[in-house]
C-alpha cells in the first residue's frame, strides 16, 4: 500500500491488475494503454483528494484524470516518435506502460497545479531566414541593391517625412564583397503539385545570380539544393512538432490545474471540463508525404 499524501489524500493499492496478452504475430489490440483499466493497472493513484490540493507529480492524478488526458497522451507519443507513427492516426496508437510514465513525467516537468492557466498558441513560431537557407560562399564584388529592394526603400522614404537613418546604411551594405552568400529555398503547394524554388541571396534576402559568388563548397548545384531542402524540411518538422507539443502540454496542464482546484471524492472524477481537443498540425508537404 502506498503511503498516503498529507491532506487526506488516499491512494489505491499499487498492485497491477491482469495484463493484456497478445498472440505471437497477431495484430495489436486497438488503443491499448489509454483505457481506464490501463491507468488503473499502474497503481499508486489517489482515491480521493480535497479541493485546492497542491499537485506536482504524476501520482497526484487519479485514474479518471489520467483517463481524461489519454487522448492527449497518444498525440504526445505520436509527436515524440514521428519516424514510427507519421502514417498512424493518434487514436490507433497503442501506448506502453513506459510511454505512459514518460509522458506524465514530461507533463509535470517544471509545472505544478499552482501555475496559472495558459492561453493556447494559435500558430507555430514564425519562420526565420536561417530555417530556409545554407551558407554557400561569399560575394566576389560589390553589388548595388536589387531593383525590388530599391523600389521598396524609395517608396518607404516617400511615405515618411523623415527618412530612417538606417536605410542609407542598409543600401551601402547591400551585398558587399566578402559578405556571406546564401542559397535559400521556398515552398508552395499547388493543385496536386509541390513547387520548390531556390535563389541566391545576401544576408538581407536580396537576390543575385551565382556568377557573383566565390564558392566555399565543391558540391554541385543539385547537391546544394538537396542540402538546403533537407535543412528546411528538418527545421519545418521541428517547428511544427514544437507547436503541436506545446498545445498538448497546455491542454493537459490547464486541465490538471482546474482538477486540482476542484478535488474529488472517492469513486468519482473531478467536476471540471475535459481537456480541449488538440488537432495536430502538419505542413502541407509533410501531409502529402505521409499519404504517399
Image (cartoon, helix red, strand yellow):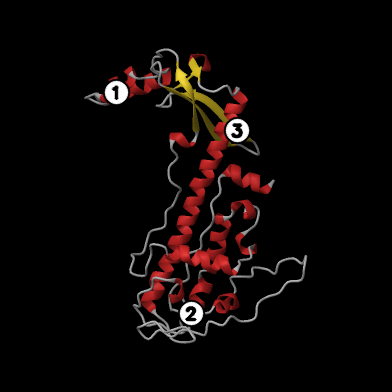
Q: Distance between the residues labelled 2 and 1?
A: 63 Å
Q: Distance between the residues labelled 2 and 3?
A: 52 Å
Q: Would you place residue 103 above or below residue 261 in this image?
A: above
Which residue: 49% across, 67% down? 104
**Residue 52 position in % (x across, y down):** 34, 77
Q: 69 or 121: nearer the eye?
A: 69
Mark 2 against mark 3, which lies toward the viewer? 2
Q: Would you place residue 209 above or below residue 260 in this image?
A: above
Which residue: 57% across, 67% down? 98
Disc 1 is placed on an element classified as helix
Q: Name the residue under label 3.
A: 195
Task: Specify the label residue 167 is tagged with.
Answer: 1
**Residue 211 position in % (x across, y down):** 52, 14
Task: Specify the label residue 239 is tagged with.
Answer: none
Q: How many marks?
A: 3
Dot placed on the residue nearer the N-terminal end, 2 or 1:
2
Dot placed on the residue nearer the N-terminal end, 1 or 3:
1
Q: Name the residue under label 2.
A: 45
Amino acid at each position: 500500500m502506498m503511503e498516503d499524501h498529507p491532506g487526506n489524500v488516499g491512494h489505491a493499492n499499487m498492485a497491477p491488475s491482469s495484463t493484456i496478452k497478445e498472440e505471437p504475430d497477431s495484430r495489436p489490440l486497438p488503443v491499448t494503454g489509454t483505457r481506464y483499466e490501463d491507468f488503473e493497472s499502474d497503481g499508486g493513484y489517489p482515491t480521493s483528494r480535497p479541493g485546492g490540493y497542491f499537485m506536482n507529480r504524476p501520482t497526484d492524478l487519479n485514474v479518471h484524470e489520467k483517463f481524461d488526458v489519454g487522448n492527449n497522451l497518444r498525440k504526445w507519443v505520436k509527436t515524440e516518435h514521428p519516424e514510427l507513427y507519421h502514417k498512424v492516426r493518434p487514436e490507433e496508437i497503442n501506448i506502453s506502460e513506459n510511454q505512459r510514465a514518460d509522458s506524465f513525467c514530461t507533463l509535470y516537468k517544471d509545472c505544478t497545479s499552482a501555475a496559472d492557466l495558459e492561453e493556447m498558441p494559435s500558430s507555430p513560431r514564425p519562420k526565420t531566414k536561417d530555417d530556409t537557407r545554407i551558407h554557400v560562399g561569399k560575394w566576389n564584388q560589390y553589388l548595388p541593391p536589387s531593383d525590388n529592394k530599391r523600389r521598396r526603400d524609395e517608396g518607404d522614404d516617400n511615405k515618411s517625412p523623415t527618412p530612417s537613418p538606417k536605410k542609407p546604411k542598409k543600401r551601402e551594405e547591400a551585398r558587399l564583397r566578402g559578405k556571406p552568400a546564401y542559397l535559400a529555398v521556398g515552398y508552395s503547394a499547388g493543385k496536386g503539385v509541390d513547387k520548390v524554388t531556390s535563389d541566391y541571396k545576401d544576408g538581407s534576402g536580396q537576390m543575385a545570380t551565382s556568377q557573383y559568388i566565390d564558392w566555399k563548397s565543391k558540391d554541385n548545384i543539385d547537391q546544394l539544393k538537396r542540402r538546403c531542402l533537407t535543412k528546411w524540411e528538418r527545421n519545418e518538422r521541428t517547428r511544427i512538432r514544437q507547436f503541436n507539443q506545446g498545445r498538448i502540454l497546455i491542454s493537459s496542464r490547464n486541465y490538471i490545474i482546474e482538477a486540482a482546484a476542484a478535488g474529488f471524492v472517492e469513486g468519482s472524477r473531478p467536476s471540471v471540463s475535459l481537456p480541449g481537443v488538440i488537432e495536430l498540425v502538419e505542413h502541407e508537404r509533410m501531409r502529402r508525404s505521409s499519404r504517399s
